[in-house]
Amino acid sequence: MKNLLFVSRHAPYGTGIAREALDALLGASAYGQNLSLLFMDDGVFQLLNAQNPSKLNQKNLSANLPALPLYDVENIFVHSESLRARALHADDLVLEPKLFKVISSQEVAELMNQQDQLLSF
Amino acid sequence: MPLVVNGREFATDKDGYLVHREEWSPTVAEALATQEQITLTPEHWEILELLREFYHQYELAPAMRPLVKQVALKLGPDKGRSIYLMQLFPPSPAKVASKIAGLPRPTNCL
Amino acid sequence: MSTLHTVNKSPFSHSTLASCLSICQPGDALLLIEDGVYGALASSPQAEQLRAVHAKGVRVYALEPDIEARGLVGRRLDEVELSDYAGFVRLSSELRCVQSWY
């Protein structure tokens, strides 16, 4: 079993990158690997609550995120400095606090160094 | 090829999924099931209702693994098994049940 | 257990290099590619941070064809070594993982 970390650093909707990261992660979940997901930089905006992209004719990416534990993605990390730089707090986010862990830059570095493969989005 | 139910046509894609999800009704589900050679029983319906609720909540049609996990959570471990779902919705439960429930093709379903 | 970081955006218009530098650890390597090579300039907003991670033990490279193409050969920081495409491949296989910052 391999350790795969999906690094999601882009905001939703403006480009397809955030959606591609999530689709790749859901696809990978079928293979029984040890999957982790990290939101950092503008990627933390994917977690903002009250998203409604229906007028953009796009699917609500934030609605998918609470389903991740059902896809055996249990390790969800959010970069603390990225949250702080955007003045976001736990109660602004779509995920319940117990579903993710807020980690520092140092911990991000350690997390990356524990992986067999990084998937950069 | 459109699905015809009581003289009304419903657009489906090349794999038989409803094109307009809002047109789904229990009657349409019966017709979709017939195309899959399935006769719906209460055991089928509780899975279909669970799927529709899953889609409503997460905007995702679940692949096999999350479907099994959600069924185990909501209906108990006896039903949350591949073999149980396989008996109800052969040969590919996530795809077949999603189709009958009026959902899109499951995301990344193998 | 180290990571190769690649950066392909100019630090004058993106925070990509800054994000990467905040994560780099001793033993990691950083390779500037495409418009990322503007990060090799002494005038880059992240020049000081780049020197600091280099001093900490992060090797810093810039892809030579991208440096040459943009007229930056004589303008790069001393801390930045040049790498050709073969060097890029060597780094990718030498380090355990690649994180691409874009």
Image (cartoon, coloured by chain):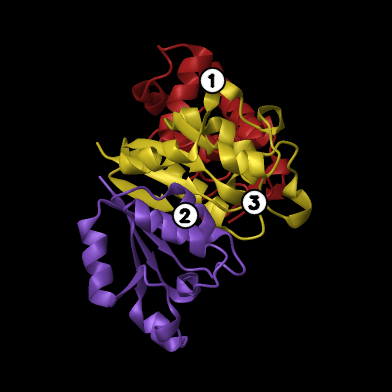
Chain B colour as displayed: red
Q: Do the residues at pointers 3 and 1 share their chain? A: yes
Task: Tell me the distance, in whole angstroms, between the alpha carbons under discs 3 and 2.
Answer: 44 Å
Give me the chain that's yellow.
Answer: A
Q: Which residue is pictured at 53% across the width and 15% down the height?
A: B74
* Secondary element type, mark 1: loop
Of marks 3 and 2, the one in the foreground: 2
Q: Residue furthest right?
A: A55
Image location of residue B22, percent across then percent down: 73, 42
Looking at the figure, which quarter contains the N terminus of chain C?
Answer: top left
Where is B83 relative to C1, above or below? above
Residue topped by disc 1: B41
Question: Mark 3 belongs to which amino acid?
Answer: Val
Question: Mark 1 belongs to which amino acid?
Answer: Thr
Q: Is residue C97 visible?
A: yes
Packing grade of label 1 (10 A; few <14, some 14-19, many >=20) is few
Q: Which residue is pictured at 48% across the width and 41% down the height?
A: A105
Where is A47 relative to C53, above or below? above
- Which chain contains the residue that carries disc 1? B
